[in-house]
Image (cartoon, rainbow, N blue to C red):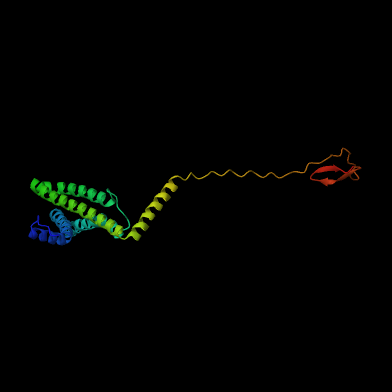
Amino acid sequence: MENTLVNPDFERAIRQMRRILPMLSFGLLISTYLVSALIMGIFHAEAAPNLGFKVAAFLVPLAIQAGRGTLVFFFQLNPAHLQSKYSFGIIAATALLLLSLCEAFFVMMPYGVSWTISVSTLMLIGWVIEIMILRETTFATQMESYQNQAQWQELRNFYIARNEFEQFIKGMPGKAVLPEPEEKQIPQELPTAISETPINGAGLGKGVSPLQNGLLISQA
């Protein structure tokens, strides 16, 4: 059924925009990474005492932005690792944004408020693009898994089993304390009767057995 309420040219433009918007959003995100790193490098290099620090003034911000992108989108490497609303990627992006804003404030304030606002706005735009792309990729991953019912059921069973295993680990009692082993006592043979017969110089008295365990045992 043809939609007569929408301008067909506008509808075609929307379809065209939806085709190019994914690549455009990723391109804009990478551009904000690069521009932010270059701006920080330029202003850091002005205060560098030698050539080594000038090179480091550009390399360090570039490495920071590259690490930021890796931390934000790292869990997309494994589609089965589902992310919650406040995932590690969102936390990492927000924490690094705050650090970048603090750096921009201290670096750009000597050059005026306008520079500080411009660079901070660029960093905020990059953060918003990060969050939007991250949520869309997470949603797309979940939809992809759901469309494959066998994979979806297997993934569901895995998370249920993992949750049960974690509950089992949390409910395990502490290590039992084993009782200390009792000391073994060596039994000593007590004499049944001790002879009172005196021992003469020639030998043992009458009715007396040879010496056993230092005692005279009567045989009578």
Q: Which residue lies furthest to the front in this view?
A: 1
Question: Residue 10, percent across and down?
Answer: 8, 58
Q: In which quarter of the image is the C terminus?
A: top right
Name above or below for residue 192 compared with residue 128: above
Give me the residue at 36% from left, 57% from top.
153
* Rendered residue at 20%/47% (across/down): 98
Residue 102 appears in the picture as rendered: yes
Q: Considering depth in this image, is 83 or 189 the residue closer to the camera?
A: 83
- Please tell me in which quadrant of the rendered image residue 62 appears: bottom left
Is residue 5 found left or right of 150 in the rendered image?
left
**Coordinates of residue 95 in the picture (x, y in percent):** 24, 48
Along the line of sight, the residue nearer the viewer: 7 or 157: 7
Q: How many labels does the image show?
A: 0
Residue at (16, 58) in percent of width and height? 25
State the residue in front, 44 or 49: 44
Q: In this view, does 77 lie to the left or right of 116?
A: right
Relative image position of residue 81 (x, y in whole percent): 32, 56
Who is closer to the viewer here, 193 or 122? 122
Residue at image location 44% in from the left, 48% down from the top: 168
Q: Which residue lies furthest to the top in this view?
A: 196
Split into 4 quadrants, where in the image is the N terminus?
Answer: bottom left
In the image: residue 51, left or right of residue 82: left
- Residue 74 shows in this picture: no
